[in-house]
Image (spheres, rainbow, N blue to C red):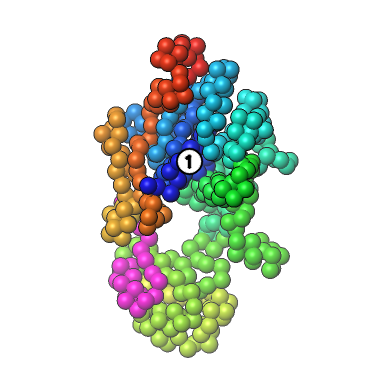
């Protein structure tokens, strides 16, 4: 038994934001039917290198626990099939440019006629209204527009993007949360609803304390590289061996422990550094002083001493380090799943650990159209009818 057993999701998404949303739902038991364009499918099936065999590593990373059905919405028969699926489904998720679903005749108001209780979630770059609604959007564009790149990078350097497509993934997470909220509300009052998720809205909501600093000072916060804007020392330092490590002194109590751990108790009661407020004011002198001190020993030795004194500290791992880390492995955040053409594929694990209804990796990332026959048979179509659909480019 999984938390979302019995929930069916019709997934008309591609790229990352939408597929990440439906990945989250599928991991915890929802029956996700991924509806793709015949012949090509999700854009990310072609995104590479790298490829594993003939499969895009990108696609494989975000499309497990889904079944693939191909439908050509230019054909009336395909739209008929979709609306037939809607009758027995709970959720529709799509991330086309606003207006595209209306042109297909599959917008919320139309779909709701087939199932008044449907939860219909649209994910787009800028939302379903406003002056930017028709603009195309990819993650890097959104990281810039949302202000994220203005606060990421070295103070004297160029703006930098985050190393993953965080605005896509963030929008997908907001969408999954929204879908679950709407399903809960439907349980209370019996009504579905429409959900409008914007990548820009999602990222602006994530600005949190950086937005708070802007509201407080009425000036944009600046890039601080590896440092924190309001806590010092709370940043990365380099050890003698050229490796970097992080230190997070989040309170004056931790500052006392930090000074003891790094054998610089002379700093603890120094009036220029005795409290976080003055440490922030004197960041320009304290950070270089500490960096010079940390160049006297290798990074791992500093981390060990800091952790021994209960000071938050840790190495800056690359992904080879991450996926061999004993804590990551213990928490089953590296998994493997059988695949029909690749024998097996590695996957990141499930981050939510339920005590009664755990999720799981039950289905490999699907081949394009892999489940056409089984899904259409369940809808009552015969083998002859399905073959006719193939001939007429419906599926």
Q: What residue do we see at 40% from left, 71% from top?
A: 312
Left or right of 98 in this view: 326: left
| 3 sits left or right of 330 in the view | right
Picture coordinates of residue 219 (x, y %)? 69, 63
Q: Quarter of the image holding residue 86?
A: top right
| Residue 167 visible in the displayed image | no
Residue at the left extreme of this rendering = 343
- Whether 302 is among the magenta residues is yes
**x, y percentage for residue 7?**
48, 41
The residue depicted at 50 percent of the width and 37 percent of the height is: 9
24 within the magenta span: no
Question: Horizontal and vertical percent for residue 124?
Answer: 61, 40
Q: Tell me if residue 21 comes above or below residue 394 in the rendering.
A: below
The residue drawn where x is 34% and y is 73% is: 307
358 shown above or below 285? above
Q: Nearer the viewer, residue 374 or 60?
A: 374
Question: What residue is shown at x 43% (from left), y 83% (from top)?
Answer: 256
Quarter of the image where one finds residue 305: bottom left
Can residue 186 be seen here? The reply is yes
**Which residue lies under the disc numbered 1?**
7
Q: Which residues are magenta?
A: 297-320
Label 1's element? loop
The one nearer the camera, 265 or 242, is: 265
Local packing at callout 1 (Cα closer than 10 Å; few below 14, some 14-19, many 20+) is some
Compared with 181, 101 (above or below) is: above
- 265 relative position to 276: left or right: left
């Amino acid at each position: 038994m999984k938390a979302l057993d019995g929930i069916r999701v019709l997934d008309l998404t591609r790229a990352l934001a939408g597929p990440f949303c439906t990945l989250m739902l599928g991991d915890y038991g929802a029956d996700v039917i991924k509806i793709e364009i015949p012949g090509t499918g999700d854009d990310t099936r072609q995104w590479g290198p790298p490829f594993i065999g003939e499969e895009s590593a990108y696609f494989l990373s975000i499309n497990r626990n889904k079944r693939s059905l191909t439908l050509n919405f230019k054909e009336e028969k395909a739209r008929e099939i979709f609306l037939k699926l809607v009758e027995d489904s709970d959720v529709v998720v799509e991330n086309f440019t606003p207006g595209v679903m209306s042109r297909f005749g599959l917008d919320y108001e139309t779909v709701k006629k087939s199932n008044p209780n449907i939860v219909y979630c649209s994910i787009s770059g800028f939302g379903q209204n406003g002056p930017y609604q028709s603009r195309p959007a990819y993650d890097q564009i959104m990281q810039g527009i949302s202000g994220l790149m203005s606060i990421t990078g070295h103070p004297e350097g160029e703006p930098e993007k985050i190393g993953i497509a965080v605005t896509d993934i963030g929008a997908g997470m907001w969408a999954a949360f929204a879908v679950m909220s709407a399903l809960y509300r439907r349980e209370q009052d019996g009504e579905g609803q429409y959900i409008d998720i914007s990548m820009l809205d999602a990222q602006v909501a994530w600005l949190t304390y950086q937005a708070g600093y802007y509201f407080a000072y009425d000036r944009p916060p600046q890039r601080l590289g590896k440092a924190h804007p309001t806590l010092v020392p709370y940043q990365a330092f380099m050890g003698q061996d050229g490796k970097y490590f992080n230190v997070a002194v989040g309170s004056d109590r931790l500052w006392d422990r930090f000074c003891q751990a790094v054998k610089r108790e002379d700093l603890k009661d120094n009036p220029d550094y005795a409290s976080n407020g003055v440490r922030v004011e004197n960041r320009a002198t304290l950070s270089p002083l500490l960096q010079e001190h940390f160049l006297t020993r290798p990074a791992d030795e500093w981390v060990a001493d800091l952790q021994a004194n209960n000071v938050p500290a840790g190495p800056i791992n690359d992904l080879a380090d991450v996926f061999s880390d004993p804590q990551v492995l213990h928490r089953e955040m590296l998994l493997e799943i059988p695949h029909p053409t690749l024998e097996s594929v590695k996957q990141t694990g499930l981050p939510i650990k339920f005590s009664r209804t755990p999720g799981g990796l039950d289905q490999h990332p699907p081949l394009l159209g892999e489940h056409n026959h089984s899904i259409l048979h369940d809808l009552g179509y015969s083998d002859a009818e399905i073959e006719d659909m193939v001939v007429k480019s419906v599926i």
